[in-house]
Amino acid sequence: MEYNKFLHIGDKAPRFNAISTLGDVKLSDYLGKWVILFSYPENFSPVCATEIIALSKSNKDFLDRNCEILGISKDTNSSNLSFLNNIQKMSATNVPFPIICDNDMKISQMYNTDKNQNYIIILDTNQKIRLIMTYPTEIGINIYEILRCIDALQKSDLEDCMIPANWVIGNPTILKAPNNYMDAVNRLNDRNFRCIDWYLCFNN
């Protein structure tokens, strides 16, 4: 099998079949849903434990957005099961999503994910890569930012708009840049928009 040396936003996500803590997993089974691929370096590490707990506690928030979480571990399935059992004992948190066994690193090679870093990869309902976040091992992921990014991507797709910095649901979005001079002039005079300049107009 050929592996992608580099994956980019907009690329089709490489398909995989794997065993997990909840049984066999095929990426193709998740077509029609948004997917969070959460790849982490190793079990029984303090930061990874907090990330899995945080994702588990926010799982309903992801499901409400038609989004499923798939954890990807470089350890064996037995180690993954032991780690989740340890998390349940120490935090009373049941992990509701599968942790995929990637101890042969095949999935990591497909997605070019470094074994010593944390990755969040967001796939849309057509399983295109829409966002990639890379975290160093000493810094945990931000659940609220991941949820905000899903909201922003879904809003942009639904309304064919752009999303400004620090946007959250309920805030104005941005019109795409005009394609010609008349479009630029017309939007400046359109009361449906709040224009700062010809290229920067917000939906009211």
Image (cartoon, helix red, strand yellow):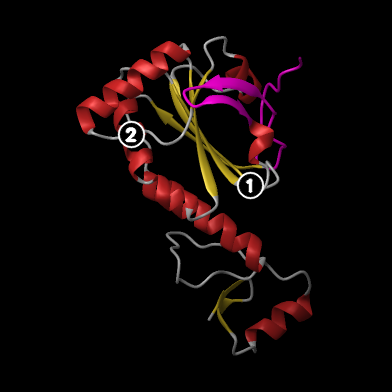
Quadrant housing residue 186: bottom right
Q: Is residue 85 above or below residue 60?
A: above
| Residue 35 placement (x, y as % from top left) | 57, 41
The front one of 66 and 108 is: 66
Q: Residue at x 41, y 36 (%)?
A: 96
Q: Amino acid at mark 2?
A: Asn
42 relative to 192 in the view: left or right: left
At mark 2, the secondary structure is loop
**Magenta span includes 57:** no
Q: Is residue 197 above or below residue 35?
A: below
Q: Residue at x 55, y 23 (%)?
A: 113
Q: Is residue 164 above or below residue 4?
A: below
The front one of 175 and 70 is: 70
Instruction: Please give the range of residues in magenta.
Output: 1-26
Q: Residue at x 41, y 45 (%)?
A: 59
1 relative to 153 in the view: left or right: right
| Residue 159 placement (x, y as % from top left) | 64, 68
Give the total number of marks visible in the rendering: 2
Contact, CB < 8 Å: mark 1 with mark 2? no
Q: Amino acid at mark 1?
A: Asp
Asked if residue 43 can be seen in this view, the reply is: no
Q: Which residue is mark 2?
A: 94
Asked if residue 202 can be seen in this view, the reply is: yes
At mark 1, the secondary structure is loop
| Sooner in the amino-acid sequence: mark 1 or mark 2 | 2
